[in-house]
Image (cartoon, rainbow, N blue to C red):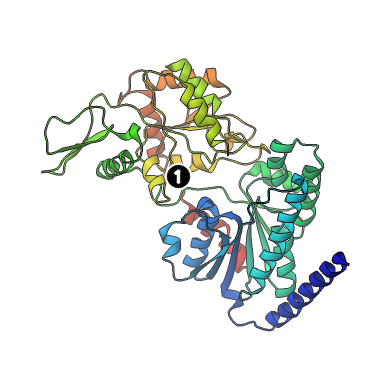
Amino acid sequence: MAASCVALLVLALLLLVLLLGLWKRGRQTGRARHMVVVVLGDVGRSPRMQYHALSLAQSGFSVTLLGFYNSKPRDELLQNDRIQIVKLTDLRGLGAGPRILQYGVKVVFQAVYLLWKMMRMDPAAYIFLQNPPGLPAIAVCWFVGCICGSKLVIDWHNYGYSIMGLVHGPRHPIVLLAKWYEKFFGRLSHLNLCVTNAMREDLAENWCVRAVTLYDKPASFFKETPLDLQHELFMKLSHMYSPFQSCSDPSHPDTERSAFTERDCQSGVVRRLHGRPALLVSSTSWTEDEDFSILLRALERKGPLREHYRHLISQKHLQHIRFCTPWLEAEDYPLLLGSADLGVCLHMSSSGLDLPMKVVDMFGCHLPVCAVNFKCLHELVRHGENGLVFKDAEELAAQLQMLFSKFPDPAGKLSQFRKKLQESGQQRWDESWQHTVLPLLTHR
């Protein structure tokens, strides 16, 4: 009896959605200039989809951006009159029952909830969807497109099933089901973007999906941070994190000092401290495709996994190295990259087909990078030219020793890498998007 009632409710909901969709199909006004961007994740931690929304708005489209609002997006997004953010609610606290049942309930809830949210919006010409996560978003967005006359654009960042495979194993039934789902519904899109040529070739060969490569490019706000802004950032962080605090008091009371810089409060002049430590940055979302133990072992030789690594860090007793694991505001992240001396990337692609956006951001700030090697990393990092590539902790330790042995040395390898990045004249996101994506939307 209960199952019959649920089935009737679902059927009634689908009928209501269908009638609403037919009504929306008749509302042609404004559809050609309206775009929807969907990310079934935290908008604030989804920079590429934020960039899509900003580029669409700058091209004259009105944009509705749907996603979870766990962290604050960039101010440029919040202050843009052409962009409306629709906050999605995540289903949390399912602690009872088998894990597969909890996962199933969450997927069904997300499907119905996302469908309802999207059907309440004005019709759009295109729906941009980030994948992963694509379960159940790909099917829902395709269905909404069918009944509202919208075209689906999937932006393939990776394969969702490959990330699930890191947790459950590649032959787990859930992983195999997710792969079938992703492959079946992925073919129903009208346009496809992807992040590497290797992924484009794999999509064509194994998925029968034709995609256009849109490399991640740094936004304009990723750049070297002026010294006065570096000092402001260091002083701000020093109030929350002890590694940014000065180890000694300044000799003059009118001097303000951090661990890296000091400022004469009378003249306003900022200078770098003599004998300052090097600032090494490794951006992370604390997920399974990054092994931070590589960096910890390398540093040891040199001298939701977040808590796991914080525990490992607390067990290390290193004389000349201090650790800090902050969560940064969106506006502070590019400032920190632009203030650092070296970036380390520990991203190991679950599919071997995506590239770490954090390295793109670091290069935008002219920050030299050491990156762990995987299948298609050569599309971004060229060993010995714009950075260094390593395979294990021993190689990383040797690279850190070489780069920091005479720090800071204007003639050292670290400075040479930075100079090459400064001279590279790399393309930025806006230019790349205008050249690659906009013609796909306007010539159809």
Amino acid type assigned to the residue bearing label 1 in the image: Gln
Secondary structure type for disc 1: loop
Q: Is residue 188 left or right of residue 337?
A: right
Percent of width and height locating residue 72 = 46, 56
Choose between 438 and 330: the one closer to the eye: 330
The reply, left or right, for residue 121 in relation to residue 273 is: right
Quadrant location of the C terminus in the rendered image: bottom right
**In this picture, is 318 found above or below 172?**
above
Q: Which residue is drawn at the image coordinates 52% and 20% (left, top)?
A: 297
Residue 444 is at least partly visible in this image: no
Q: Which residue is mark 1?
A: 426
Q: Please, is residue 427 above or below residue 409 in the view?
A: below
Q: Where is residue 127 shown, x and y percent of the image?
A: 64, 65
x, y percent for residue 104? 76, 53
Residue 211: image location, x then y, percent: 68, 53
The residue lying at 74 percent from left, 45 percent from top is 99
